Amino acid sequence: MSDGKFFSTTKKGEIHELKEELRTLDRGKRKGAVKKVIAAMTVGKDVSMLFPDVVNCMQTDDLELKKLVYLYLINYAKTQPDLAIMGVNTFVKDTQDPNPLIRSLAVRTMGCIRVDKITEYLCDPLQRCLKDEDPYVRKTAAVCVAKLYDINAELVVDRGFLDTLLELLGDSNPMVVANALAALQEIKEQGVPNVMVLSPALLLKLLRALNECTEWGQVFILDALSSYVAESPKDAEGIIERVLPRLQHANSAVVLSAVKVIFSQLEAAGRDPGDRALLRKITPSLVTLLAAEPEVQYVALRNISLIVEKYPGLLSHEVKVFFCKYNDPSYVKLEKLEVMIKLASAANIDQVLMEFREYASEVDVDFVRKAVRAIGRCAVAVEEAAEQCIGVLVDLIRGRVSYVVQEAVIVIKDIFRRYPNKYEGIISLLCDNLETLDEPEAKAAMIWIIGEYADRIDNADDLLEQFVDNFPEEPAVVQLQLVSATVKLFLKKPQADGKPQAMIQLVLTYATQATDNPDLRDRAFIYWRLLSTDPEAARAMVLAPKPTISDSGAAVEPSLLEELLGNLGMLASVYHRPPASFTSHTRPAVLQVDDTKPPPPASVMDGSEDGGATAAAAS
């Protein structure tokens, strides 16, 4: 029978009925009542007043019921720390239960309850479970050590749990090894760098366990291997060879972790990322990630973007794999665009531009804008393809689609800066589409082009005048460009029927007297004083040759790129930000039990009459 019925009741007096059902001797009714409590807790109802009655249900042989009670305890222990101590005796008993599932469940739950008194009683059972005969219990206890360290680090060190974890790295069960390693890595990240040092002997143990672990155990081991510093090229080569089979794994996290290990050992092994034998093994695994569901594709693409930025030749012949499909979500399409821009070269620019041109005719306006910008970025990045890119942009402008024209104007400004005095023949086409520009960035780009090439545009003063008429209403980015453009026009055409002089007088007057923008006002004052005191100095400064630009739209700083490559498969590689910028090592508070309160009754402690002594001691 489905458990969905437990979420459908909204009766009044429900808490009283639940209390009665929790106290009944009928096991079926009691389990049903606990399920109702968990359902109410899940949808946000406060059922903390049932705490003593739910704890009474802990003493049972029914594993399902015990799991439900433990789930309730974990949730409400943070709001009822004084009552949570009532379950200690049962917890301790359950850690010695013949059933390994119950033993592991008890020690896991005690580790999740951040109450100081429970922590004290956890140590002895945890010590036993770390040396339990069942590997399932040992692997659960290993993770519990990391949780206990987060609550009370001194206690973990004093009781020798760290040494026990190090011993578990040599366990015969690979999952125990993986969990012990994960626990040590977590403790290491909390500021204990020397808790585990990867030695050659330990390295061999981890490589042996790698082949037999579950997929997530493999991820833990591979992440640890990525930080190993090989003592010789032979050692690094050996690690690469042992890890290469993981590239064929079905789990994308394992594949990315394996790629991370290989890249971390390349330099030590003296291998070149362009090595064809290596490429044949790494490239297919990265390409295969793009056949997964969209969410996995996105994560893979964010990681691939970092990889191709560092090793552009790695996927240079696989650009077709990144072509967008009609049913790709927009976030996947945008990431594919970024990767294609980075992979664009003289050898593949024809097919890339053909693809971008197709994208520019789609119905998704945001994607079309990105595609047009991608064409411009390819022109800036690949000099041999600049003329082809200009041809595509000109065709798009002639289509007279407003948002396409505006994006084209923006990227053409960058192309002019990248290749000065080379493609100015298209300026007349841009001027013919002046009336379609209504977005600030496009207006600013067009004004920059008019000012920069004022001496080559016969009616430059008339074109700028259209913008000057609306100067007070324009956004700041447009106003700043107008100030600079009118100054350029005046310096390049000082005698042109007096219109440039009148225009600059109007613009500088408004910019210095009728604006609250300090950037605009300061720029106008500087230009005004330069023109009035030393026009030649103004000419030398304003009309000085400008440095050429490069495509740095999505470039990552080299130092940050190295850090992100060391975190492939992690959140940092998705955010493209260092882990320290979005993580915190602040520990949650450990709840204290009020020692002045009287101990709870023994019958409430564990549902039995023989728990009185332990109850008194626990409280």
Image (tube, rainbow, N blue to C red):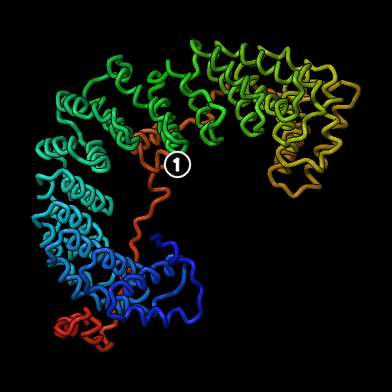
Question: Outermost residue, right direction?
Answer: 497
Give the residue at x 72% y 41%.
Answer: 476
> x and y percent of residue 322 in the render?
48, 24
> x and y percent of residue 228 in the render?
21, 36
Q: Name the residue under label 1.
A: 575
> x and y percent of residue 313 in the render?
39, 18
Which three-letter amino acid code belongs to the residue tagged 1? Answer: Tyr
Side of 424 where 570 appears, left or right:
left
Quarter in which the C terminus is drawn = bottom left
> x and y percent of residue 437 in the render?
77, 30
Q: Nearer the viewer, residue 421 or 42?
A: 42
Side of 214 where 34 appears, left or right:
right
Give the residue at x 68% y 43%.
Answer: 519
Residue 422 visible? The answer is yes
Side of 40 where 192 appears, left or right:
left
Residue 538 visible? The answer is no
* Corner quadrant of residue 558: top left
Give the residue at x 32% y 18%.
Answer: 279
Callout 1: SS: helix
Q: Is residue 226 above or below residue 285?
A: below
* Corner quadrant of residue 509: top right
